[in-house]
Image (cartoon, rainbow, N blue to C red):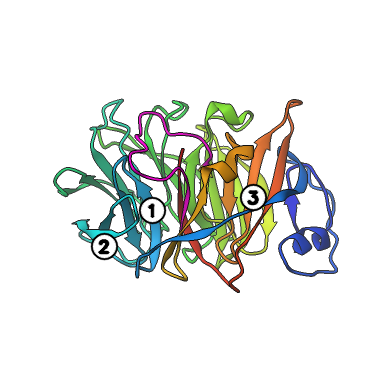
Amino acid sequence: MRAFIGRLGFSAATCLALLGVSSPLVPPTTTNTWARNLYAADARLPVRVFARTGLHLGDILWTGSRFLYTAEGGRALVLADPSGRTQGNLATVPANGGEMRCVLSPGSHGFPAGDVFCHASANQIYAVSLATGKVSLFAQLPSRQASDGALAYDAVGAFGYKLLAATGGSDGGSGGTVFAIGSDRSVTKVGAYAGPGGAEQALVAPRSLGAPAGKLLLTIDKHDHLGRLVAMDATGHVQTLAGGLAFGLDPLVMLTRTPNLPIGAAAPGLYIADWYSHNVLFIPASSLAPYAGDLLLTTERRGQFFVLSPSSNGAYHLASLATNLHQPDYNFEGAVYIG
């Protein structure tokens, strides 16, 4: 397997040993990305079960007062209190046959406050009112390719302060297309990304992340393997930032506080939706303090954590984070940081 992180060239055996796999292969140095150093952090992150939901979790979202869960293949947006205990359904969307991810409306640039936008498997973009549970079809992406629900809001402005949705997914063919959706419900194509595999999650990099600031970051895998992190700019140009991760990539989240989003009664920290166990896992913010401001990523399978962080000389570091997880397998599908 070819494994690479940024411009750092290292052996596949080294990378796969880090990922818990052995390999005799040694690839050539790669040259097209920005993370310069790979290392293992010393601290072991304490992960505990936060909530046992009974759901095949596909995503988790914090609204400022409650959690929202979605289940893979389900149509319901399930409410949970700050302790993670489910409280019934907020709403049920008309159709969803796979993974559905949701983001909060920014309440600015023409988008209404108090709504949640969800990207369903057949590329419907639904708007759901947090106050009433009313569901409306906000937009329909012009693609017949199935999706894993990758959706983000451009708070930086590089894409014109629009929603960004990527088609494709782990089992949705090879590659996919990114579309921008304006507050006027207009849909425009931004660009395409190549396979193998397809997009799982999306996030627009903030200015604090340095070189990729303002670009759309996509985590990509193929059947829970071949994990990659790519960045697409507003012209549709795609750059691979990291690749060759044996167990795929899925959740990604900035370890920063979301502006104007109350912490409320939630415990500060990272919340991870695990499809395999149906549990929400939790890491306290105090344990993540050394990585404040960094980009956290996890593999889809096997429960592996990484952070990408800028350094003072303009290079980037990728750190593998040790945890106390001990089960033979996990299937992470979403994450949210409350700080």
Residue 60's disc number: 1
Q: Secondary structure at mark 1?
A: strand
Q: Main secondary structure of the magenta part?
A: loop
Badge 2 element: loop
> Residue placed at 82% from the left, 63% from the top?
13
Task: Work out whether 337 lies above or below 16.
Answer: above
Circle 2: residue type: Arg
Left or right: 24 with respect to 331?
A: right
Q: Amino acid at mark 3?
A: Phe
From the viewer's perspective, tell me whether residue 23 is left or right of residue 126: right
- SS at circle 3: strand
In this picture, residue 107 sits left or right of residue 46:
left
The answer to which of marks 3 and 2 sits earlier in the sequence is: 2
Which percent across, then down, holds residue 142?
34, 49
Q: Name the image quarter holding residue 155.
A: top left
Picture quadrant where residue 22 is located: bottom right
Checking the image for residue 306, the label placed there is: 3
Q: Give x and y (percent) for residue 190.
A: 45, 38
Label 1 to label 3: alpha-carbon separation: 19 Å
Which residue is at a point 58% across and 72% down the rendered structure image? Answer: 327
- Would residue 102 be found to the left or right of residue 242 on screen? left
Q: Which mark is residue 75?
A: 2
Look at the numbered discs 1 and 2 and tell me whether their residues touch, using CB distance below 8 Å: no
First to last magenta residue range: 254-272
* Label placed on residue 140: none
Q: Is residue 329 above or below residue 308?
A: below
Camera-near label (3 vs 2) is: 3
User: Horizontal and vertical percent for residue 83?
Assistant: 34, 54
Query: Residue 213's spot in the image, x, y percent?
Result: 56, 30
Label 1 Cα neighbours within 10 Å, binned few <14 / some 14-19 / many ≥20: many
Query: Real-space Cα distance between discs 1 and 2?
Result: 14 Å
